[in-house]
Image (spheres, helix red, strand yellow):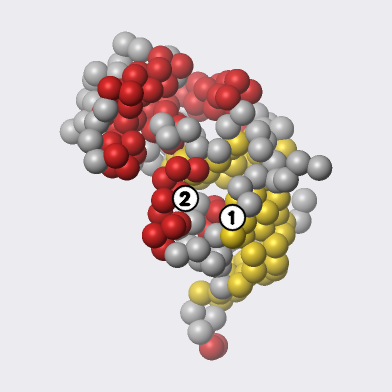
Amino acid sequence: MTEPLLNVSDLWKTFGDGDAATQVLKGLDFTMAQGEMSALLGPSGSGKSTLLTILGTLMRPTSGSHTMLGQDLTTASDEDLTEFRNRHIGFVFQFHNLLPDFTALENVIFPTAVREGRETAAARARGRELLVRMGLADRMDFLSTSLSGGQKQRVAVARALMNSPELVLADEPTGNLDRAAANQVMETIDLLNREEGTTFLISTHDDKIAAWCRRQILVGDGQVTG
């Protein structure tokens, strides 16, 4: 049997201490296979955002096991987590967080430039290839402030893919877009999932966005319930 891309077992996350303690994740169990495109569903306060943050190695759980690509991420050092995150995980957020004084291309290659300490010809070629695939060949040299909302979010998807991560975590990536722009973004994600095998976990409250995904994962009261 193929080893799962990531495996979470008996995961707990508690904020605060004593009487003020709030348990957000309560023994959550969760796995994803390489190449999945899944929707993460659940009401506000169910623990979705906390789970995404832990899966992205931006927060440590209180207890439990979190492994990805066979590496135990609950015991890794902060330095190792930073390197792992840069190489293996991409992020897309509801607010695209593009750098306003950078072009679309410069925004896309930024993660690689940070990692390598400079822009390289190979990085620029990879960035251009991604923007062409996003349907933005004629926008790559435009400042991000001159792009539409849907275009900005497709740039954000390209940026998330720049370092060829195995996993992309998306937190309400179409929440600020109209339906047409949201569908453009999801068409792009669907294509990349099918053609490149990139694994996507997409947190959403939108049933139409969830319908694009081939698996729906329901979180409620800090546990996976379906």
Q: Which quarter of the picture shows residue 47?
A: bottom right
Secondary structure beneath dot 2 equals helix
- Seen in the picture, residue 189 relative to 110 is either above or below; the reply is above
Q: Amino acid at mark 2?
A: Phe
| Tag of residue 71 | 1
Check disc 2 and report the residue beneath it: 84
**Residue 46 visible somewhere in the drawing:** no
Q: Residue at x 33, y 23 (%)?
A: 122
Residue 11 lies left or right of residue 138; in this view the side is right
Q: Which quarter of the picture shows residue 21?
A: bottom right
Q: Residue at x 77, y 51 (%)?
A: 226
Mark positioned earlier in the residue sequence (2 or 1): 1
Residue 83: x %, y % from top left: 41, 51
Tell which residue pokes out farthest to the left in this image.
101
| Tag of residue 167 | none
Measured in 3D between alpha carbons, the distance from the residue under mark 2 to the one under mark 1, in whole angstroms, is 9 Å
Q: Residue at x 64, y 69 (%)?
A: 64
Q: Are marks 2 and 1 in contact (CB under 8 Å)?
A: yes
- Seen in the picture, residue 126 relative to 100 is either above or below; the reply is above
Residue 86: x %, y % from top left: 42, 45
Q: Nearer the viewer, residue 166 or 70?
A: 70
Q: Amino acid at mark 1?
A: Gln
Q: Quadrant of the N terminus?
A: top right
Tell which residue pokes out farthest to the right in this image.
1
**Residue 201 visible somewhere in the drawing:** yes
Residue 108: x %, y % from top left: 34, 30
Residue 117: x %, y % from top left: 24, 41
Residue 143 lies left or right of residue 174; in this view the side is left
